[in-house]
Image: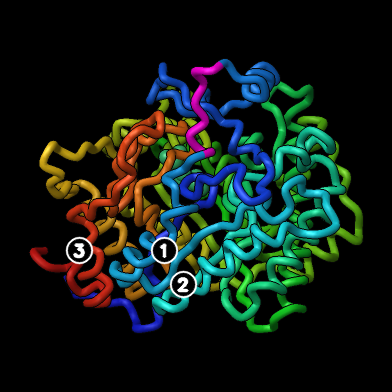
Amino acid sequence: MKKYKFTEDFMIGGAVAAHQFEGGWNENGKGLSIADLRRYNPNLNRKDINTERLMTNEKLKEALNPPKDLVFPKRHGIDFYSQWKEDISMFGDMKMKIFRTSISWARIFPNGDEELPNEEGLEFYEKVFKERRSKGIELLVTLSHYEMPYNLVEKYGGWKNKQLIDFFARFARVVFQRYKDLVRYWMPFNEINAAIYSVWAGAGLLDDEENIESKSYQAMHNLFVANALTNKIGKEINKSFQMGCMVAGMLTYPYDCKPDNVLLNLQQEQLRKFFYFVVLVAGYYPNYIKKYWERKNIKVDITSDELEIIKNNTSDFTGFSYYMSGVHSIDTKELSEGNLMKFGKNPFLEANQWGWQIDSVGIRIMMNQLFDRYQKPLFIAENGLGFIEKLNEKNEIINDDYRIDYLKKHLQQLLLAINEDGVNCIGYTLWTPIDVISHGTSEMTKRYGLIYVDQDDYGNGTKKRFKKKSFDWFINVIETLGESLWENQ
Ligand code: BGP
C-alpha cells in the first residue's frame, strides 16, 4: 500500500468538551447547567446507554433535590478548572496542531438570559486560550456542547422556545468579540442532531414531555436558526473566522441487498443524517423532511425570514463526529448500542464493551458521502473509542494497543479518502487527548484518552495524569505527517 501522508497544513489534534473535563461547576459565578444535573448511576447497564441518557420529570426532580449519596460527575469533571496550565503543557508536548474545546455557556451567562456577561468566566477562557496559543496550538471552539444554563429550561422550556435564539446570539457576540484574535475556527453547536435523539443534552427538553417529537423538531429548527445567525455574527466580527457545523455521524448500511432494506436504510440516512447537513451546509429544508412531518402530523413554526437566515449563512466547513456504524433491516432482531441511538447489529464488525461497533472503512465512506454532496471542506471533530483501563500499583504505562489499532485504522482510511478519492478534509481531532467523564453514562470507567487520569466513577483518586503508550504513538504520527501509520503493513 502507498504510504500516504498528511499535508503540512492538515490540522490534526484532539477534542474535549467543557462539561466533561472542566469541573468548577459553581466557581466564580458559573450558573447551574443541564450537564450538572446528570447523575452517575452505580447500577449502570453498559449495554443500554440510551436509557441512561434519558432525563424524565422524575429524574430531574431528584437531581434538583438530591439524596446525599447521589453523584454528579460532570460537576467536578477531571478538574481542568484548576489544573489547566499543566494539562495544556501536556497537550503541547503531544505536538497537536489543533485543539477542539468548548465554552460553558453558563460560565459566561450563568442564567442564559442576563444582559451582561460574567467577567470571571470570560477571563478564565481568555487565559486558557492564550496559554494554548503560546504552545502554538490552533483552536477550534464549540459554543455549546450539551450544557446550556438550566435556567433556560426552567423558565423558557429549553430550545423549543424561540426566545433562546436571541439569548444564544448575545452569548455568541460576547464570545466572538472577546476572543476574535485568539480563535479562528468555530462550531456553534456540538452534534446538533442530538436535539432529536438525546433531547435533554441537545435541546434542554424532557424525554417524557407530551408530544416530544413535535417539540424536538421545533427545537431543532430554532437551533438551525441560531446556528445560521451565529455564523452571520461571527463573520461580521471577524471576516476571517471559519464557521463549521457539527453533526453526529450516524453512518448506516442496509443489512443486505433486499430492496426493502436498501430503501429503509436510505430513508433512515436521510432522516438521521443528511437532513441536518442539507440545512446547515446547503441552506434549505429538503422535501423528505416536510413529508415526514406531514405523515406524523408534526407542525413546526418556520417563518420566511428564518428560512432566509438559514439560506444566507451556511457553514464554511462540514464538521462531524464519527465513532461507529450500524445497519437497518425491516426485520432487525439484534440491536447494538451507539452514539445517540441504537442500531441494527452488523455481523461483520466487532464492538467494544459498550456495544459500539468498530468500522474504520466507514469513516472513508462517510467522508465521500459528505464531500460529494456538499463540496465543502470536511473536519472530523471527534473519533475514538471507550475502553476499560486501570493503572497498576506501580503506576506503569498503560499499553493501549487496542486504542492505537482503532485510531491507526481510522487515520489510514482518512488518508485514503483524501489521497485516493480526492476528498478535501482540513482537520481531525481525536476524542480525546485525556480521559474525561463519559457524556452518555457519566462514568469515568469509559476511557478514551491518550493521558490516563487517576480518578474513579465517584471522583475519588489523586487526579494525577499519566501518559499511555498511545501518547508517544500519536506524537510520532503527527511528526511524520502520518507516514508512521503505514509501518509494518
Ligand atoms: C459524542 C459527544 C462527546 C463524547 C462522545 C463519546 O457524542 O459529542 O461529548 O462524549 O460522544 O460519548 P460517550 O462519552 O458517551 O462515550
Could you tell me how far apart the alpha carbons at marks 2 and 1 are, in whole angstroms?
Answer: 8 Å
In the image, what residue occupies the spot 58% across and 43% down? Answer: 25
Q: Is residue 206 magenta?
A: no
Q: Looking at the picture, which amino acid does disc 1 mark?
A: Lys
Q: Looking at the image, which residue sits at the far left?
A: 488
Part of the protein shown in magenta: 68-75
Q: Are marks 2 and 1 in contact (CB under 8 Å)?
A: yes
| Residue in front for this viewpoint, 88 or 386 | 88
Q: Is residue 97 left or right of residue 403?
A: right
Task: Give SS at disc 1.
Answer: helix
| Residue in front for this viewpoint, 304 or 433 | 433
Could you tell me how far apart the alpha carbons at marks 3 and 2 are, in whole angstroms?
Answer: 22 Å
Could you tell me how far apart the alpha carbons at marks 1 and 3 are, in whole angstroms?
Answer: 20 Å
Q: Looking at the picture, which amino acid does disc 2 mark?
A: Glu
**Residue 129 percent location from the top left of the image:** 52, 70
Q: Quadrant of residue 211?
A: top right
Q: Looking at the picture, which amino acid does disc 3 mark?
A: Asp
Q: Are marks 3 and 2 in contact (CB under 8 Å)?
A: no
